[in-house]
Amino acid sequence: MTTSPTRNSLAVRVAAWSESRPESVAYTHLRYRMHERTPSTVTYARLHAAAGELADRLRGISAPGDRVAILCAHGLDYAVAFLACLYSNRIAVPLFPPAGPRNRERLHGVLADARPTVSLLSHGDSTSSAMLGPVLGQVLALASDVAAPSMPSAPPTIDPIHGELAYLQYTSGSTQAPTGVRVTHANMTTALEQLCHALHPAPDKSILTWLPFFHDMGLILGMSLPLYCGVLGVTLSPSDFVKRPIRWLEAASDYRAGITGGPNFGITLAVSSTTPQERAALDLSGLDLLLNGSEPVRADTLAEFTATFADHGFRHTAHTPGFGLAEATLTVTICDPHSAPTVHRFDRSALADGRAIALPADALCGPELVGCGTPAEGQQVRVVDPTEGVELPAGRVGEIWVAGANVCDGYYGRPDATAATFHATLAGHDGSWLRTGDLGFLFENQLYIAGRRKDVIVVDGRNHYPADIEATVESCAPEVRPGHVTAFGHDDGRRADLVVVAELTSVDAVAPEELSALARRIRTAVAVAHEVMPGAVMLVEPGRIPKTTSGKLRRGECRARYIAGQLAPIAVI
């Protein structure tokens, strides 16, 4: 087997496990039909063989360095497809099958940008070709059962890496059109090593996620890390989780998960959408780490989860917040996995002025922020004045800049955006820095996130952070869906105003005659807490607020729909 182990380490690791532990289960995919759960498993030997077989097929119809789009269903197919790209020195483009008009529109945009030579589909998928057409390139379907034993053949080979790129990670589009992040083999290996060092996966426990494999956290933490470390990987699809969130926790209990994770909204859903009867048989005592990332971490979410599942063995110290982004492959900072998360309330007016001043522990007002830990191994993190390009001291709010071997080498086909984002220069420091676009500050040696720079709302010369306002709305209005509130600024040419859009928990959550009163209650709560009167409070039906594929609020898109009159409010004041 000819390869460079330092530059294609995931492929090399899988090949090594297939030799040393051929019959050990590498990955398990849980499928559901009502209350029935069916596991599908693949051994290291079969995974290596299946990836090698598919890599041979790719070699026959493409060249090294060609892009290969992966539109397979969530599960074992996806792992085989991704590894086949690594084995054959093709650039993977992790995507998803089309499932509707918006989904299809996004896929068309990504595929037009990536221009794949080949697209990989799951066996029996005729919908993708019909919906997407020539933009897929040549279509190649996987075997009907990738986990089934195959006829003996030549040992799978891993091509030497002639190019740097391993895959293109398309961003979720929360602040811009989908853009492909160029992830090199070195970036990927660094990110996996950082997670191994920070998390110390237990060899006798599984790593379990429901995160989609086309998302950076799902691809690196959920699929690649178990295969890299040689521990059992277990997954269920995002749709199966959303339909019945208890499935995630039952799987963690039954498969002795040591590590799991997800965004804040998923942890909230596990509390709000499970019942005491469903939780009765859970044993979460084996869970060492519940990673929380991809969107703002909420202190009340952590507390509610612990209160709900402590009787089932969950330890509050297992909560492990972190901060990361696709442009850094995944992780930037992460909390100590052996300590409880750190939470502080900060003075709201001072934050608006760019200063972080902690309030006494018994304070009842002010945003409650969760520490996102310290830099991952080999990672440099600075808080910078985004205008002057000068590092700010601890306790000052600025843009988070990052440097390290996990930072990717740019955006695919976008040299200007690459230069602006990946090649910033920091006064007094050598080398290039990644501008994350996120605002934050350092306090007591931890990084705290304040919000997105582009999302900051400026009204009457004062800064307001959307997540803080959105939290106020949720706390004063239980009729509103958690995680489904957006706050943004709107300038109509005469003045800049704050606009709040909130989804109701259901269309019948509030009687028609009480809708205006609810909107006024929200307006009053925001005015009192933040000293800014919303110019408009809009109540909408569930599903109206746009989100990214990973569940993040698309505030810019929501603002555009508000201006265009496309939100169809059921009440507005």
Image (cartoon, rainbow, N blue to C red):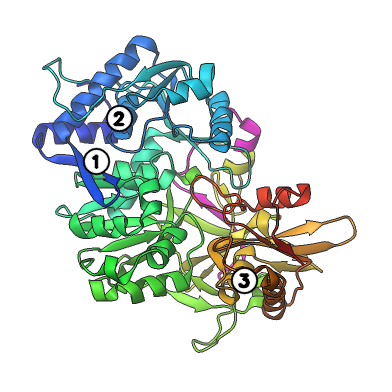
Q: In which quadrant of the rendered view does residue 18 lie?
A: top left
Question: How many residues crowd mark 3 within 10 Å: few (<14), some (14–19), many (20+)?
Answer: many
Describe residue 572's horizontal placement relative to residue 14 as left or right. Answer: right
Task: Identify the mark at residue 227; answer none if there is no mark.
Answer: 1
Task: Identify the mark at residue 83; answer none if there is no mark.
Answer: 2
Describe residue 336's horizontal placement relative to residue 93 as left or right. Answer: left
User: Which portion, as a residue range, is magenta?
Assistant: 393-418
Percent coordinates x, y for residue 231 in the rendering: 19, 47
Percent coordinates x, y for residue 566 in the rendering: 72, 48
Q: Secondary structure at mark 2?
A: helix
Percent coordinates x, y for residue 222 in the rendering: 32, 46
Closest to the observer, 338 or 455: 455
Q: Was residue 415 drawn as part of the magenta stretch in this picture? A: yes
Closest to the observer, 435 or 296: 296
Which of the two labelled residues, at mark 1 and mark 2, occupies the earlier sequence position?
Answer: 2
Hey, what amino acid is under mark 1? Leu
Do labels 1 and 2 touch, CB within 8 Å? yes
Describe residue 312's horizontal placement relative to residue 540 as left or right. Answer: left
Question: How many residues crowd mark 2 within 10 Å: few (<14), some (14–19), many (20+)?
Answer: many
Task: Identify the mark at residue 473; answer none if there is no mark.
Answer: 3
Closest to the observer, 143 or 182: 143
Q: Quadrant of the C terminus?
A: bottom right
Mark 1 vs mark 3: in front? 3
